Amino acid sequence: MTKRLRSCSKPAPSRFGDHCFGDNVEYTLCMPKPCADGRWSDWEPWSNCSSCDKGIHSRTRNCNRPKPSPYGNSCTGQSLQVEACDSYCIDCRDCYDIKKKYPDHQSGISVIQLWKSKKLVSVFCDMDTDNGGWTVFQNRFDGSVDFYRNYANYTNGFGDLTGEFWLGLENLHEMTSQGSSELRVDVKRANGSAAYEVFKNFSISPSPDYILRVSPGHGTAGDQLCALSSNSGAPFSTYDRTRDTCTNGSSCAIDNHGAWWYNKCVNVNLNGKYCTPGTNTCSWRGMTYFHFSGWESLKTSKMMFRRVHT
């Protein structure tokens, strides 16, 4: 805030003249730098369900990335979100268990208890595809979440189960270590054409490498040379933790702008950059499945697993 002064002196009132009307001090606001509007942080994880059957859960976010300056605009929208939810299923270790115990359970978010660590984890269950029981661990459809993340992010998971997300390698390892599982990949192009591929004997090894184990696939997306099953035996690589077998000393994770079980070549890069669907501008650095759509960037990608027996 600044001020300015004036005096009643041009001319000063005579002995019997009227004094000047008005204030002799004026204040005004000043801005040392441009106003900064506030922006929301990412949503915090959902809280646990409030009851043992149907209940509610909530999550919060903060207007602090950045905070609004003193005269900037605050964030629009709510800082608290509350939704109905199902509580965790006792003795349900993944969506396969939920499907067995509750055959009519619909697709959506559920809370399960991991079989070994006993940790409660929110998961998205697909109960519609191929008789259901699928635990979704990767979902992309609009590019709203950046998948070019570091090793810690991919270990712990990121994103939003109601939108785009990665469930986390540590959770994925524990869930796939409890019994024989199958992996399903669903992809879609900008023109609406869709394909899938199913891979038997799917598992992820413990940290720090989280090695992929999977048998050759069958389906409509293709699993030929350098496709997903060729990555079996490869550790998971991110831009800050390269464990791949790329040639010439380069990093597949950096070269392909992603995070994956990279081998010497990669024709499946579902954690690559989300580019304009239907274009080839990103080539192999985009979200691609070569044997289905070449180097054309995909519109959607979903990865999920299901145990085939207890």
Image (cartoon, helix red, strand yellow):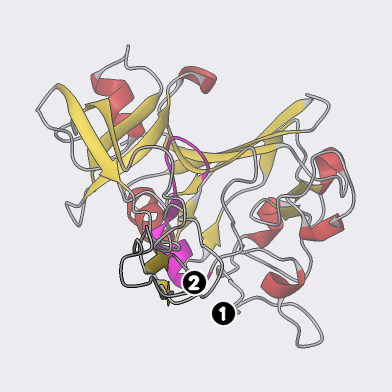
Q: Name the residue nearer the viewer: 116 or 137.
A: 137
Q: Would you call the spot at circle 2 few (<14 residues within 10 Å), some (14-19), or many (20 or more)?
A: some
Q: The C terminus is located in which quarter?
A: top left
What residue is at 32 percent from the left and 17 percent from the top? 105
Q: Which residues are magenta?
A: 150-164
Under circle 1, the secondary element is loop
Image side of residue 92 versus residue 162, left or right:
left
The tag on residue 151 is 2
Tag 1: amino acid:
Asp
Q: Can you give x and y, in whole percent of width and height, for residue 274 in the image?
A: 71, 50
Q: Name the residue nearer the viewer: 236 or 40.
A: 40
Q: Quadrant of residue 19?
A: bottom left
Tag 2: amino acid:
Tyr
Under circle 2, the secondary element is helix
Outermost residue, top side: 104
**Residue at mark 1:** 240
Image side of residue 174 versus residue 257, left or right:
left
Q: Can you give x and y, in whole percent of width and height, for residue 292 in the image?
A: 82, 38
Q: In the rendered picture of this protein, how many numbered marks are placed on residues?
A: 2
What residue is at 67 percent from the left and 53 percent from the top? 229
Q: Is residue 159 magenta?
A: yes
Image side of residue 99 versus residue 53, left or right:
right
Image side of residue 279 versus residue 129, left or right:
right
Nearer-N-terminus badge (2/1): 2
Outermost residue, front side: 16
Q: Would you call the spot at circle 1 few (<14 residues within 10 Å), some (14-19), or many (20 or more)?
A: some
Task: Find out whether the residues at labels 2 and 1 contact each other: C-beta distance under 8 Å.
Answer: yes
What residue is at 70 percent from the left and 74 percent from the top? 254
Asked whether the viewer can see residue 206, the reply is no
Q: Is residue 11 above or below residue 81?
A: below
Outermost residue, left side: 52
